[in-house]
Amino acid sequence: QVQLVESGGGLVQPGGSLRLSCAASGSIFSAYGISISAMGWYRQAPGKQRELVAVITSDGSTNYADSVKGRFTISRDFAKNAVYLQMNSLKPEDAAVYYCRTNYSGGYWGKGTLVTVSS
């Protein structure tokens, strides 16, 4: 069984920064599988569909939604089986629940962490 646990959300003023973390846990077998799979961050704002924010592959290649390019940076620590999202220059429209996902074995989701951007 794979578990993904997000942390780092909170309230931040427009223009501020947050760093989200996602830690993956499971068996040794699944840990290896996660390490060779893509991991990503998604978000869902109230009344909207869940959308891809950023993804990072096992070789470190990254891809971002146009709305966050130049402001957000995704990274991962293979030793810790963790993925991070550095969010800078936050805007009110970035407010959402942010979810972590791994593509391993059909995909697993975390429960999300809430980001609120408000003055």
Image (spheres, grey):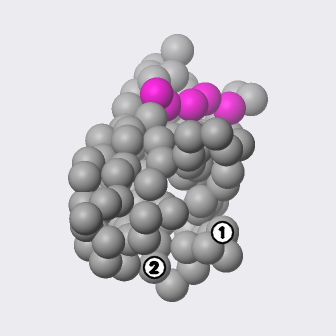
Please give the residue where the numbered disc 1 appears in the rendered image: 65
Question: Helix, strand or loop at disc 1?
Answer: loop
- Residue 96, above or below 73: above
Quadrant of the rendered image containing residue 62: bottom right
The three-letter amino acid code for the residue at tag 1 is Ala
- Residue 48 is marked as none
The three-letter amino acid code for the residue at tag 2 is Arg
Question: Helix, strand or loop at disc 2?
Answer: loop
Binning the other alpha carbons within 10 Å of mark 2 as few (below 14), some (14 to 19) or many (20 upward) gives: few
Number of callouts: 2
**For the point 52% across and 15% down, which residue is it?**
1
**For the point 46% across and 28% down, which residue is it?**
111
- Residue 71 is marked as 2
The boundaries of the magenta stretch are 107-111
Evaluate whether residue 1 shows in this view.
yes
Q: Position of residue 43 (x, y in %)?
A: 56, 48
